[in-house]
Amino acid sequence: MFRSYVLVCGGTGCTSSNSPKVIEALENEIKAVGLQDEVKVVKTGCFGLCALGPIMIVYPEGVFYSRVKPEWIKEIVDEHLLKGRIVKKYLYQETIDGDNIKNLMHTRFYEKQTRIALHNCGVIAAEDIDEYIARGGYTALEKVLFHMQPQEVIEVVKASGLRGRGGAGFSTGMKWQFTASAEGDVKYVCCNADEGDPGAFMDRSVLEGDPHCVIEAMTIAAYAIGGSQGYVYVRAEYPIAVQRLRIALAQAREYGLLGDNIMGTGFKFDIEIRLGAGAFVCGEETALMTSIEGNRGEPRPRPPFPANKGLFAKPTLLNNVETYANITQIINNGAEWFASMGTEKSKGTKVFALGGKVVNTGLVEIPMGTPLRTVIEEIGGGCPNGKKFKAAQTGGPSGGCIPASLIDTPLDYESMAAIGSIVGSGGLIVMDEDNCMVDIAKFFLDFTVDESCGKCAPCRIGTKRIYEMLEKITSGNGTLEDIDKLEELCYQVKSASLCALGQTAPNPVLSTLNYFRDEYIAHVVDKKCPAGVCKSLLQYVIDPEKCKGCTACARQCPVGAISGTVKQPHVIDSSKCIKCGACMATCKFGAISKK
Amino acid sequence: MDTVRLKINGIDVEAPKNATILEAAQSVGIRIPTLCYLKDINAIGACRMCLVEVKGARAFAASCVFPVAEGMEVFTNTPKVVAARKGTLELILSNHRMDCLSCPRSLDCELQALANEYKVDQYRFASNTKLEPDIEASAPHLVRDNSKCILCRRCVAVCKNNQHAAVIGTNERGYKTHIASAFDMPLVETSCVYCGQCIAVCPTGALTERDDTDKVWAALNDPTKHVVVGPAPSVRAQLGECFGMPIGTNVEGKLIAALKRLGFDKVFDVDTAADVTIMEEGTELLERLKNGGKLPLITSCSPGWIKFCEHYYPDLLENVSSCKSPQQMFGALVKTYYAEKAGIDPKDIFVVSIMPCTAKKFEVTRDHMSAAGVPDVDVSLTTRELAAMIRRAGIEFTQLKDEVADPIFGIASGAAHIFGATGGVMEAALRTVAEIVTGKTLANPDFHDVRGIANVKEAEYDLAGTKVRVAVTSGLENASKLLDKIRAGEADYHFVEVMACPGGCVNGGGQPHQPGQVRNFVDLRAERAKALYSEDAAMTLRKSHENPVVKELYDTYLGQPGSEKAHHILHTKYVARGLYNNK
Amino acid sequence: MKTPADLAAIRVAKKHLVASRHDNMNAVRVTVGMGTCGIAAGARAVSNAFVEEIFKAGLDEKAIVVLSGCMGDCSLEPMVTVEVPGAEKVTYVKMDAAKAARVVAEHIVNNKVVTDYTK
């Protein structure tokens, strides 16, 4: 038994900030001072406050060291772990409350969160099945296999109100019911871990931090619907998640929790991993399934629906990682417990990946219906550098934006749909006054154009034309007529595309047109970018009052666009200027600005 | 069969339970436009032209794949639906090189027809880049221009699903998607068999046959050349379709008349050579039956099938008959037998064949196809190219009076005519072989068991104690299944007919185009063959060995079928080929 | 292959590993004064003893052991404070491993302060 546990995040975010070196340093130093029998180092998954990574939490005190450098470890081990003197200067400063150190669950970031899907992430050793079991793992599966009938399980999931967390928000219980009722000699249980939305990493964190929770849930689902084989389709760009999953599957098989005779009941189920190959469209259910079959990853029309004819033309259940991550607790704590959180139609919690212009970027899990304001101002800590919040983008390339005027919108399926946005998979990008909404729309269309599978003309050609129009507008060559044409084209692509990628690709454009039409108009009429982002519309100007004529800028300019005599105010020729900004960076007198 | 009741545009419809909305609509005279759907070949719901509104549904339904349901209410032409179709057409046209003035498919193009119907042009969503031709023309039979491709995927589907070759596919994704072979390698280096089914199903001018008409015009206008032409059996059955005549109309008389007006020095008939083929191949079969030769004997008149065998079943090449195809026998005999008879130097004879086939353009270049020391056939034109020549020459086809081919090499039996249908070669051979083996005249020359469009047809005949088991197949996917059985030693046939094109030559890669609207509701294979079977049934000369031209050929020139001279002139050799990087 | 009974055994055996990884606001807090003087006086043996006794008593979820720096009275070391939620903090002085066992059994389990060891 150990006195103390030092948890270090080994998720992708903290790993890329060097947490493996922190872990290595810890293990070496703890051994060096002879503490290896008293203090255990635990490599966990993501605990959420990614902005402060690498993250290190010492239990049982619950103190939170942030942005940990390997060079600090000797001091921390000597002072804190050996001598009991917490090294305050390395702590997350918000936890310091005079002489007291607050538990980090009482900081602004964590106070309003309810970690259900993430309940084990950042807490257990990600590669140790025993820790998962110790925390109640596989009790839900035991309950299901020994004490519940398949239909009972489905009823519980239905009653919980859980809806698909991948973005569509379809009733999970209904989906299980359809697949259970379908006729087929073989049924499949699939997990969608393709997570393609830019800025989304909820599913990644669950797989990196708590892979067994997904395995257990898939096994429960297989029991409920009569499935015998499972597949986790995970994007190849998640090597740590894949590795953790591989280890977890091997451990589960070793313990007989997967295989031919699960827990001695004779129930058979096993899971294979299938890697994606760099296609966002393979997150679409029919494209995902045909990809597993070895074909080009392209969606197909429905009906038939996957519940009836899916993978290998058999009834197939496909759920998102986060959807599965809720199942074990719903089974153990009951449908009413889950349904007691959230709103009337959107039950439970949702994990959001908070990114962009916000102080506390990271992973956040909140009850459905939490207002956006809470997420941005309290949990997120607001926009940094005193900038004004402008809009939040949810749902990635399929979603819309929520303008500052609607910051009190609750985050649930119905409320978001009512304002023209979607909850989506959970990506939540915060934007401030320095973001150009037309540029944001263009960013998402750039992504969609690249990811379109090419099967149907409206998406294949339509998204490209939308992007071309946005380029035209942001380069200063657009007209008012272009804005109307753009809107019409968006509706065309939305209504005629074969799958949800094309049907939702225009959403960022339509949403920004709806709430920020004045920005579009400024781009085409005034040929100006109000946020100062679109390069072609920027003008770099020298203020003659402030200019000392030192010629430093003229000498920096790579294209000789600045002219003037020594000690006289200089002038930039905007027809030559390539908007590189070198002059502004050089000027010591603040005489150059861009507008 | 169970049916369901639904409403389409307010009209009550009763349709089979597993029908699609498209089929149900057609049954009450409602046409829903399609560009990518082709029955039994391509059902992927990709082009989005067939979108319809279904009451209560969240989004449009692709009617070509959407199944009907009891009580469904469908609307095929609401303003929203029309707007969606127009928008899709606009987008397609914005990425389509509009070459309509000189494109070979102009007035016969499914995209052009729809664009005109919806009054759409591309200018609203015009791209800034000017489209240049994007040509791939390495293979001898076709030209691909991806700047005109609308990515309907019909060509990919027919090549993979129906022809077992899968040498073309979609490369890259999104806007950069294009149809090409693996790693964009030239088509000629793949195991493409040149069957031309991809051309036949293409709705636009993206895929066309290589145009060899200029060579023929040049020959016709060259006074030093003696230009001889012969049409294949199927041409007379389908040429009328190019001039607005109903499918299945036999236009043999007008065909010959048109060829004469085009200025050919002699208008013979390849069907005559088909009768010779039966003599040679029938003899070959009897030889193998008697002397324990390689069985089953497999027919060899389909050059697409031959190339397929060389790529995919080289171990079965010994089974294939060494007989040349009727086209090649035709040219060989014209440049030997006829040249001698007419006293013309074979080097001055220019032989043109009119074929329903694109692989014949390759066949004329094969080795061991020069009986007189010069290529047996100089140019093979498709039915489509002939139609273009007839139009260019200002010949009013439908007004022509029937004429007959020059009798020196222009008389053919009914058995020869039915070569164009699947099972035709088999039936023709059986008529001759049966009479030779039994020594008796057949009471009824019809062999119905080998007719029809089933994937594989089998029959067993007792010919004076000799049991002869036969099989007939068409379409290379069907052929591959049969050949797998033969290869595994599980098939017990003596004689097998294989045709590359589904349904036989009447549905060949060089035949007139029929748009999806026709192909989806009319079985071309069956309808087109009718012209040949009815011509045969009405004739008195119905067996190859009774053909007087054939008799004289053997009596005065070749001797016996299978003689050394016959072998030199009328037989050929094959070569095993790899699947990729064929140089 | 693990039966439910096997899994239950693992749960029991490994419970202590994960028991303390939450905010522990309602746990009994045993603070052992460390610092250089504490270590010199043998405080490490005391903290280890507390950990072991708490584990043996099956109280991993109810009580935690933390360290602190020097508590001040170096002559009274090793010093240990025990805070039961809702009750006053009790300070024990001149502790050793054996005394730790008694504090766990009486104070933490039965809520009876061991006045013999207090200041």
Image (tube, helix red, strand yellow):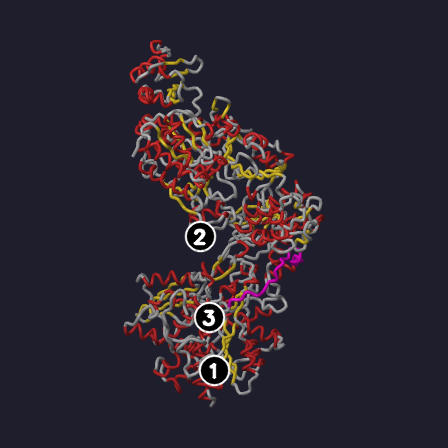
- Disc 1 element: helix
* Residue B357 visible: no
Whether tag 3 and tag 2 are in contact, CB under 8 A, the answer is no
- Give the chain letter at badge 1: B
- B423 sits left or right of B14 in the view: left
Residue closest to the eye, A222 or A359: A359
- Write the start and end of the magenta stretch as one range: B117-136
Residues under labels 2 and 1: Cα distance?
53 Å
Q: Nearer the viewer, mark 3 or mark 2?
A: 2
Instruction: Give the percent coordinates (x, y) of residue B51.
Output: 59, 50
Residues under labels 1 and 3: Cα distance?
24 Å
Q: How many marks?
A: 3
| Residue kind at label 2, given as amino acid type | Asn
* Residue A532 visible: yes
In the picture of the structure, the residue carrying the numbered disc 1 is B409
| Residue kind at label 1, given as amino acid type | Phe
Identify whether B122 is placed above or below C10.
below
Identify whether B546 is placed above or below B465.
below
- Give the chain letter at badge 2: A
Which label was assigned to residue B359?
3
Instruction: Give the percent coordinates (x, y) of residue B243.
Output: 60, 70
Q: Quadrant of the C terminus of chain A?
A: top right
In the picture of the structure, the residue carrying the numbered disc 2 is A295
Instruction: Give the percent coordinates (x, y) of residue C47.
Output: 34, 21
- Disc 3 element: loop
Residue at (51, 23) in percent of width and height: A97
